[in-house]
Image: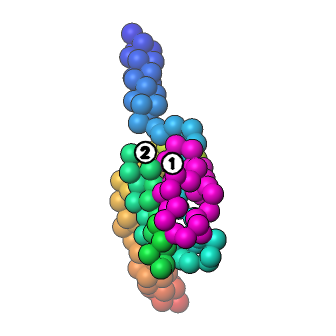
Amino acid sequence: MRAFAVIATVLVAAGFAAAQSPSAAPSCSYTCPSSDTAYNDLVSSASEPYEIVCTYDGYGTCTYDSNTGALDSDDDSYNCPSHAHHSCGYKKRFNVVRALAARRAAAQPATSIPDVLKKRATLKRKRTTT
């Protein structure tokens, strides 16, 4: 009976940890290029549901499709890059072992005898023996 309880507890804990862990699937998105083709720096960017609006120095605006990164409209005197910057990053998985070790380390009390007191005790023993 005890073995059954242990196995059930482990399965429930594993299911709970799996439900909380982020996936290792890449999270890809499109962002505004840091400068346009005339080397004007990016001033601001805004992400709408279906488009990305990039504003550059000199008040030029470029609009990109947020799904494909393709240029939708060029209000920057034809200085908009043809595609938005595509970047993918992987999310870190939740490490159960590391989290439990950190929790255990935080729960352990600090040593009751600091190093200074240990040194004092050894010096006192040396003094009393001589």
Q: Kindly tell me whether residue 53 is visible in this rendering.
A: yes
Q: Residue at (48%, 78%) from the top-left corner?
A: 57
Residue 33: horizontal and vertical position, in percent?
57, 64
Counting other residues with Cα less than 10 Å from the Cα at mark 1, is it few (<14), some (14-19), or many (20 or more)? many
Q: CA distance from mark 2 to mark 1?
A: 6 Å
Asked where in the image residue 108 lies, by quadrant, the reply is bottom left
Q: Secondary structure at mark 2?
A: loop
Q: Kindly tell me whether residue 27 is visible in this rendering.
A: no
Q: Residue at (50%, 56%) from the top-left corner?
A: 73
Q: Which residues are magenta?
A: 62-89
Residue under circle 1?
Answer: 65
Residue 19: horizontal and vertical position, in percent?
42, 31
Viewer-proximal residue among 92 and 29: 29
Are the residues at dot 2 and dot 1 in contact (C-beta closer than 8 Å)?
yes
First of labels 2, 1 by sequence position: 2
Viewer-proximal residue among 94 and 63: 63
Residue under circle 2?
Answer: 50
Q: Residue at (52%, 52%) from the top-left corner?
A: 72
Q: Is residue 84 magenta?
A: yes
**Horizontal arrangement in the rendering, residue 71 relative to residue 46 (left or right):** right
Q: Secondary structure at mark 1?
A: strand
Amino acid type for the residue under numbered disc 1: Asp
Up-down relation of residue 2 to residue 124 (above or below): above
Q: Residue at (38%, 51%) from the top-left corner?
A: 48
Residue 123: horizontal and vertical position, in percent?
48, 86
Quadrant of the image containing the N terminus: top left
Amino acid type for the residue under numbered disc 2: Tyr
